[in-house]
Image: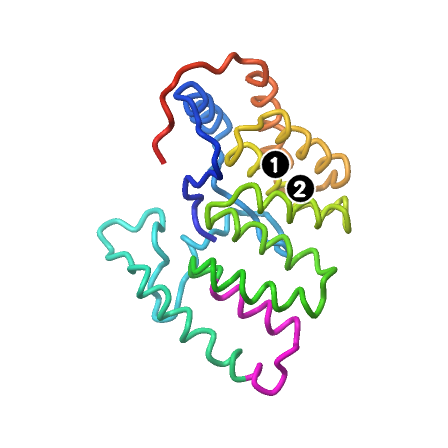
Amino acid sequence: MADLQAQNSGSNWTGTQAYVLAIICLVVGIAIGYLVRGSESPTAPATAAQAQMPGGAPAMGAPGMGGTQQPTPEQMKHMADKTAEPLLAQLKDKPNDAELLYKVGNVYYDAQQYADAVDYYKKSLKQNPKSTDVRTDMATAIYYMGDADASLKEFDVVLKDNPNHANALFNQGMIRWRGKMDIKGAAESWKKLLAANPDFPRRQEVEQLMAEADKHANMKLTGKQTAKQ
């Protein structure tokens, strides 16, 4: 998955808000962009930026790349199309296979082709509307496309069907914080996450995030400078 691009839906950050977020990130030592896939175990930050596409070319923005040439968005799209070809061939015989549609969506998600990913996630959900893992990934992709509000609405649907979905609660908290600067709301998501999932693999980091959020929840946010995205 991609490192979080600074994408907010109509929410202008003040300079103070951006500063608070940066300080918390440094204290906690977690990449604030790290969002987890719906069905994966969040044991390590597995981001699209770290994913390897066909030919061994790392996705854009991969940390520690040194002087390696980063693929362009067009190259990423081409690689995703090539990777998806076998799945798309299977879809010709099974066009309504929800799992196949989900897998194709994941290919495009990992290549940061979020609009294509959302398209396939929607097709998968049409066949299986109650798949909370698929909807979690779709909500996350929608956020990466720049619409935090629409993303959070999808997470509401996920959590209505499965109130204890660990990765949905984790991502909801991150997006409330990162996309809406709703520190209190983020802490509420993470509190629910840990209460329902005491063995969550990244429990320690979530607890640190909650502690830092609590310290800054009542900070007076002033200033007219909008954070640069």
The disc labelled 2 sits on which kind of residue?
Answer: Leu
- Residue 30 on image: x %, y %: 49, 35
Callout 2: few (<14), some (14-19), or many (20+) C-alpha neighbours within 10 Å? many
Q: Name the element at disc 1.
A: helix
Measured in 3D between alpha carbons, the distance from the residue under mark 1 to the one under mark 2, in whole angstroms, is 6 Å
**Dot 2: element:** helix
Tell me where residue 7 appears, x and y as whole percent.
Answer: 44, 41
Residue lying at 51% horizontally and 12% vertically, measured from the top left: 220
Residue wearing tag 2: 169
Q: Is residue 78 above or below residue 134?
A: below
The part of the image, by quadrant, that contains residue 23 is: top left
Q: Magenta includes 93?
A: yes
The answer to which of 196 and 182 lies nearer the viewer is 182
What's the residue type where badge 1 is placed?
Answer: Gly
| Foreground pick, 179 / 211 | 179
Please, is residue 57 above or below residue 211 in the view? below
**Number of callouts:** 2
**Residue reaching furthest to the left:** 67
Quarter of the figure with the C terminus: top left
Q: Identify which residue is drawn at 36% across, 51% down.
A: 62
Q: Dots 1 and 2: beta carbons under 8 Å?
A: yes
Q: Which residue corresponds to the image point at 68% horizontal and 30% vertical from the top-left?
A: 188
Residue appearing at x 49%, y 39% in the figure: 9
Q: Is residue 23 left or right of residue 219?
A: left
Residue 26 on the magenta segment: no
Q: Nearer the viewer, residue 128 or 22?
A: 128
Disc 1: CA contacts within 10 A as few (<14), some (14-19) or many (>=20)? many
Q: Residue furthest front?
A: 10
Return the residue at label 1. Answer: 173
| Residue 123 position by quadrant | bottom right
- Residues in magenta, as a range: 90-108
